[in-house]
Image (tube, helix red, strand yellow):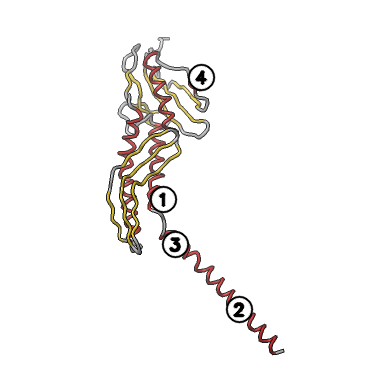
Amino acid sequence: MKTKRGQVTIFIIIAVVVVAFIALAYMVYPKIKSNFQTETKNPQAFISECVEDELNEYVDLISKQGGSLDPKLYLPYAGYNTSYLCHTPENYLSCAPKKPFLQKDIEDELTRTITPQVEACFNSLQLNYEGKGYDVQMVPGKIKIKLLPKKIIGTFDYKVTLTKDGTETYNLFNIMLDNNLYELIKISDIIVEWAIVYGKIDPISIMAAYSYIDVKREYPTWGDVIYILKDKEVGGEFRVLTRSFAYPPVPS
């Protein structure tokens, strides 16, 4: 009988210990997990997350403003200052292209504009790791935004060396956005070519050649033609504004 009582007592003690351990683990584990994730967060992921939202905002703005974040020759349209990609101030004459190297212009402007954010993110990375006891050595490098088919790639040629219980070195950070700006620019180049020769192009012919694109053509003022290109599959929008072979309105 004493043996059975002893066994019951042992089981009770074990049960209490197990319950106490589970309760302690429940309270402590979230902190351990949180600290572990923060402590071991990859610098590449840190930089990518830090830059992504800002770069997306600039890409959206430059697309809706016709290829420029700070347009000089533009038309206010639907809440945005849309820049002319082909323009002439004269009536009856062909337009002259204003951005013959549109892709490169956009890449350069995005690079210039995102550079302060990238630098701030690397400074934040350094402070974050130093706050966790790391020795951080950082060598800044070239920042570049590149448009590619269905993607926008940002490369940051920084070298970051972290030393604590060992040494880890990270080179050439990057960010990748799923975006079709490259394709929309190629279509806008075609629209500009037609504007130079014919003044405008029928949206149906564009949609026939590019089935995934929806094209809306509007005439915001006499002489101006704006094409709103939208990707029906993945989203994304680009505005193409031209003024070519402008005919003044017929007097009534």
133 or 239: nearer the viewer:
133
Answer few, some or many: residues within 10 Å of disc 1's Cα (few below 14, many 20 plus, some between 14 and 19): few
Say which residue label 2 marks: 14
**Horizontal arrangement in the rendering, residue 119 relative to residue 35 (left or right):** left
Q: For the point 32% across and 35% down, which residue is it?
A: 109
Residue type at numbered disc 4: Ile
On the image, the x and y values in percent for residue 51 come to: 38, 46
Please tell me which of labels 3 and 1 falls first in the chain: 3
Answer few, some or many: residues within 10 Å of disc 4's Cα (few below 14, many 20 plus, some between 14 and 19): few
Q: What is the quadrant of residue 148 in the picture?
A: top left
224 or 232: nearer the viewer:
232
Please tell me which of labels 4 and 2 falls first in the chain: 2
Secondary-structure class at tag 2: helix
On the image, the x and y values in percent for residue 152 come to: 40, 37
Please tell me which of labels 1 and 4 falls first in the chain: 1
Circle nearer the viewer, 1 or 4: 1
Q: For the point 36% across and 47% down, which residue is it?
A: 173
Secondary-structure class at tag 1: helix
The quadrant the C terminus occupies is: top left
Mark 1–mark 4 distance (CA, rounded to whole Å): 43 Å
Say which residue label 4 marks: 204
| Cβ atoms at labels 2 and 1 below 8 Å apart | no
Please tell me which of labels 2 and 3 falls first in the chain: 2
Mark 4–mark 2 distance (CA, rounded to whole Å): 78 Å
Please tell me which of labels 4 and 3 falls first in the chain: 3
Circle nearer the viewer, 4 or 2: 2
Label ID, residue 36: 3
